[in-house]
Amino acid sequence: MLGMLVALGFVSPPTQAAPHSQQHIVRIGVYENPPKLLLDSQARPGGIMGELLLEIAKREGWTLEAVQCDWQQCLNALQNDLIDIVPGLAYSPERATLYSYHSRAVLEDWSQIFTGKGTHISALNDLNGKRIAVMSGTLQLTQLYNILQKLELGSKLVITDSQYNALKLVQTKQADAAVVGHLFGVRHAGEHGLKTAPIRLEPTSTYFVTAKDRHLDLLAAIDTHIKQWQDNNDPFYTETLNQWGLRLIEKPTKPWIIPALLTLGILLTLALLTVSLMRIGLRRQRKKLVRTEHHLHTVLDAIDAYVYIKDDQFRYQYANRKLCEDLNYTTVSIVGKTDQDLYANKQTINEFRHNDEQVLYSGERLAVEEVVRDRKGDVRATFFSIKMPVQDPETQQTSLYCISTNISALKATQSENYRLAFYDPLTELPNRRLLMQRLERHLQTIEPYKRPGALYFLDLDRFKHINDARGHAIGDALLRKVARRLSLMIDPQDIVARLGGDEFVILKILQLGTVRDCHKEALEFAEQVRTRLEEPYSIEGHSYLSSSSIGLALITDSTLTAEDLMRQADTAMYRSKENGRNQITLYEPGMQEALEEHLSLQHDLRFAIGSDQLRLFVQSQYDKQNHICGAEVLLRWLHPTRGMLTPNLFIPLAESTDLITPLGDWIMASVCDLLLQTQECSFPISINVSPIQFRRPDFARRTRQILETSGAPAHRLIFEITEGVLMEDFSSANSMMRELKDLGIRFSMDDFGTGYSNLAAIRRLPLYELKMDRSLILGVPMEQEANAIVRTVLAMARQLGLHVVVEGVENEQQKEFLLRRGCHALQGYLFSAPQLVEHWLEAIEQEDGAQP
């Protein structure tokens, strides 16, 4: 990098240079930005910042080495330690992460809009449809872009590499207006035939800067001198500012006081000149003037706004009652005062003075928002001020007439409307609308390979269960705590938003690096989020556990739109849920096709419920006499194009949507019809109950309604539920089971032995039956370990008084072993495969006829 700068002439070749702390050589980056900074004829730093730095170097014993570069080259060289200091950099929080600033600003400046003679721009709305030239990489660009976005103005930004070129583009009709620094524009706008528009951007403070946390001794020395000069009104400091055009206009040699009111003073003066000749007419005129003045004062004092007049020294000559009462002055005592006498905040005083100067010096009307702050800097009120110059025709002296309306309530309403439009009211996070705007802006204005990013789509696992079981108040509190945790994990340039329900999205800007580095950083942050959201949440004295399924999509050169990126992250999130929840999945192109397949199957299932596509199968259970002693109802889906589908393919799909409730109701109603068709039989019929369906607060009510509507005998109905349903929320499960038991329904613990049951808890549940999983009997009777496990389960069941059914029995050896050890019922292909309900009913009739 240094060799490149030497070749281009930006720096001199190194000559055994020691650090500046030893030889006192300080390398200064100098770019053309008069009057703030320039390179003088002797190749020394010039302009305001340059001359101040020369004086500091003289007093500190430094030797300054000027390195000429353009704006971006200076900043790049500073970051690479090729120069030590860059003067004239405005402060912003984003820049503070890259550069170190001293504490006391050197001077204040602002950005101004300049236009050609034929272009009229007097208010922000006039920018709509205009081409605006602005220098890249500056705060001017950021401020202007934010204003255009907030007001939704259709302006086109013409990006250029210097302020000179910005003015040149307007001169050559390639742009309608240019935004440059006020000091620069006042000095050079006339050279390009441009005029000042009455619109300025937010003021900025100008500093000397170094690379982050480097050369802090230089900044400390600079800060010491700046503070001394400013606090002591040092002649060198003020003269330096004056000679570069920051001197206020000279005071008139013959000050005058304009009459308090416009026409009154003129009429009164004319009346006094002719008093000797027109005494009678004067008396009439005086009465008329008194009435007019009274009426005028009455009108002005009744206005709910500040009405005032200032002379060309910015001293108040008139103020109406509203202004005087708010500032605790009388209409007499306020005359002759300045804003410095009336207001305590320096920023407010400077803002008023800047606007007043602009009106008096340009001779043009100005409509502008002005903010009044208290001593601490907090905003007390916002005013919309209309200021215009009025010139006395005789003395040619100009006064300032102004009316300022308090729009604080309007601004608060606008702010509230903005908050409602762009922020989630529950969590106060940005909503989808603001997220999409930020995402589109990132994709359009920043090249992805320069500022890589990642989008994280989060969905809280089992949130609906907590919300349904504990109420919306607890659910809302949990969402707020999640929002708080996520907000504390992101950097200022990132954004976390709530899309609604339990879905959150994070847009994170990654550090520069290779694609591999970006992948690693993105996944590491996702793991931090996943781990943080696993930690317990304390709400109203209770602890709640949740987790998150996270989908991750990287912003790359191939990313087309914000919607594409959102869809990719959402697709990856669904894959995390399918993989068991509490997972992190990085988007891959093939996932979209899988999601579309998933949605297609979901659509087909919605229409299959209640149709002949869903088929009930029944598998009988047999006792030791080889008689049917029970049956289990199984579900199959005869899909029109995919063929016969087993429950493991579509039940999870129904559970992840609202389809599980209508599907479960249809199965239960169908089983009730089956119970009525087998009234002559005494054995029970079992059905599997989905965990999601069982946890619904209205499950017991819906079951009771189906039983009452059908008239089926509830005592012949067995619900098979898994260990996980019972152990996840024991109290709620126990309560639900006892409510259903009161209806006559019995319960079987399905797949027993595959989980980690709390036997003490099982003892307290109203269970009727244990159903041993087929995995427990695979080695029976050949393997001693398998035999021991089966004997233990059967012994435990006898002690608890539970009926035992074993599924998956496939040979005579398993049958004999289980029956000898007291198993009550067997189910498996040894006895009967699952049959269509119609065929099963025929088999039941034949068996009944065959029995004596």
Image: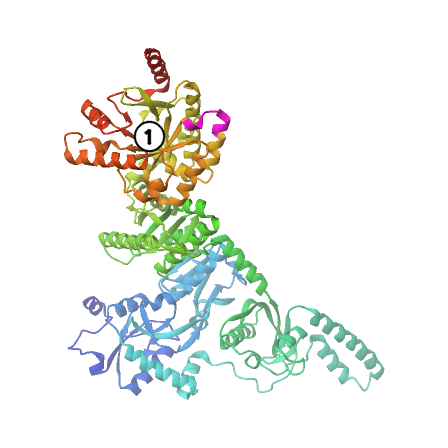
**Scheme of image coloration:** rainbow
- Please identify the quadrant where the N terminus is shown: bottom left
Instruction: Using the image, determine if residue 17 lies above or below residue 93.
Output: below
Tell me where residue 487 appears, x and y as whole percent: 38, 58
Residue 803 visible from this viewpoint: yes
Q: Residue at x 20, y 68 (%)?
A: 2
- Please identify the quadrant where the C terminus is shown: top left
Query: Is residue 714 shown in magenta?
Result: yes
Range of residues picked out in magenta: 706-715
Tell me where residue 347 appears, x and y as whole percent: 49, 75
Q: For numbered disc 1, what is the local secondary structure?
A: helix
Task: Specify the amino acid type for callout 1.
Answer: Pro
Q: Residue at x 52, y 59 (%)?
A: 415
Q: Residue at x 27, y 58 (%)?
A: 512
Pointer 1 residue: 647
Q: Residues within 10 Å of mark 1 (few under 14, many from 20)?
A: some
